[in-house]
């Protein structure tokens, strides 16, 4: 279906029947086995934007990714919805990784930057406005286009830090649970997901790793070294 085609309920349900049939053809018994349990290794906290389909863009099947999405991938300490998802994923499902995923051209971030009034969501976007104000002295040195991209990335770093400072993550790390938190950004331009060099594996690492990732983001582009390894320090990305 192209982006301008209409999709009514019949079309939606027919698409679903076709998808379920294709999955069952490829993996007979898939849905029956999935009924027994879910054991995802990843929790994804991302933007609600329809152009950023979590499972699809990382090639994971139903049962492999626990997902929470809201406008502009915000992790607010008063948001019981997000905190409940996080606690269930970490405490009950024992996910090994939590990803906070922003994306380029985010409408929520743009609204915060441009102070657009859109309705009830203005109060939600205020969380991102706080990010803009915190880093305003750096953002003001950039062009408007650069500001949007930079704020999308800054928002990921700030929300990742917020997530690390929740009681859920503090408790998990205090009892020695192995769970890593990552800050990632997805590009609408090319469909690629990239690390923002922020991975945290313990409470002691939060502020140091956040400060390092922030410093890297604020480096002039020409001064940013080409990464040779991904965050796990094992997979070589390019020849050193
Ligand atoms: Zn967005």
Image: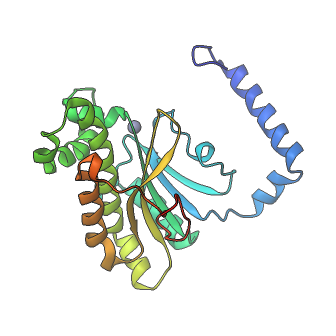
> Which residue is found at the position 76% from the left and 63% from the top?
36
Specify the color scheme.
Answer: rainbow
Quarter holding the N terminus is top right
Q: Is residue 11 above or below residue 71?
A: above
> Which residue is found at the position 26% from the left and 58% from the top?
214
| x, y percent for residue 121 | 30, 35
Q: Is residue 75 above or below residue 115?
A: below
Q: Depth check: give the residue in front, 60 or 216.
A: 216
Q: Depth check: give the residue in front, 34 or 27.
A: 27
The quarter of the picture where residue 21 lies is top right
For ligand 1, which image quadrant applies? top left
> Which residue is found at the position 28% from the left and 47% from the top?
222
The quarter of the picture where residue 122 lies is top left
| x, y percent for residue 212 | 27, 65
Please, which residue is most extreme toward the front here?
240
| x, y percent for residue 91 | 51, 73
| x, y percent for residue 26 | 86, 46
Taking the image as shown, residue 91 lies to the left or right of residue 109, namely right
Q: Depth check: give the residue in front, 71 or 102.
A: 102
> Which residue is found at the position 30% from the left and 61% from the top?
213
Taking the image as shown, residue 190 lies to the left or right of residue 134, namely right
Label count reads 0
Please, which residue is most extreme toward the left here?
137
Q: Is residue 24 above or below residue 174?
A: above
């Amino acid at each position: 279906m192209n982006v301008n085609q209409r999709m009514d309920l019949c079309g939606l349900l027919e698409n679903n029947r076709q998808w379920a049939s294709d999955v069952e053809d490829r993996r007979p018994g898939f849905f029956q086995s999935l009924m027994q349990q879910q054991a995802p290794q990843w929790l994804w906290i991302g933007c609600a934007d329809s152009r950023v389909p979590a499972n699809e863009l990382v090639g994971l099947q139903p049962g492999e990714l626990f997902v929470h999405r809201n406008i502009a991938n915000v992790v607010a300490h008063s948001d019981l919805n997000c905190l409940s998802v996080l606690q269930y994923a970490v405490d009950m499902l024992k996910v090994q990784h939590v990803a906070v995923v922003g994306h380029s051209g985010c409408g929520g971030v743009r609204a915060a930057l441009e102070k657009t009034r859109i309705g009830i969501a203005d109060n939600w976007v205020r969380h991102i406005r706080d990010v803009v104000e915190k880093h305003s002295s750096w953002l003001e040195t950039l062009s408007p286009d650069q500001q949007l991209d930079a704020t999308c990335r800054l928002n990921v770093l700030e929300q990742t830090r917020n997530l690390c400072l929740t009681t859920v993550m503090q408790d998990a790390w205090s009892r020695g649970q192995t769970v890593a938190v990552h800050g990632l950004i997805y590009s609408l331009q090319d469909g690629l997901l990239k690390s923002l060099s922020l991975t945290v594996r313990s409470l002691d690492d939060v502020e140091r790793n956040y400060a390092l990732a922030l410093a890297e983001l604020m480096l002039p582009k020409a001064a940013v070294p080409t990464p040779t390894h991904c965050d796990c320090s094992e997979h070589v990305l390019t020849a050193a």
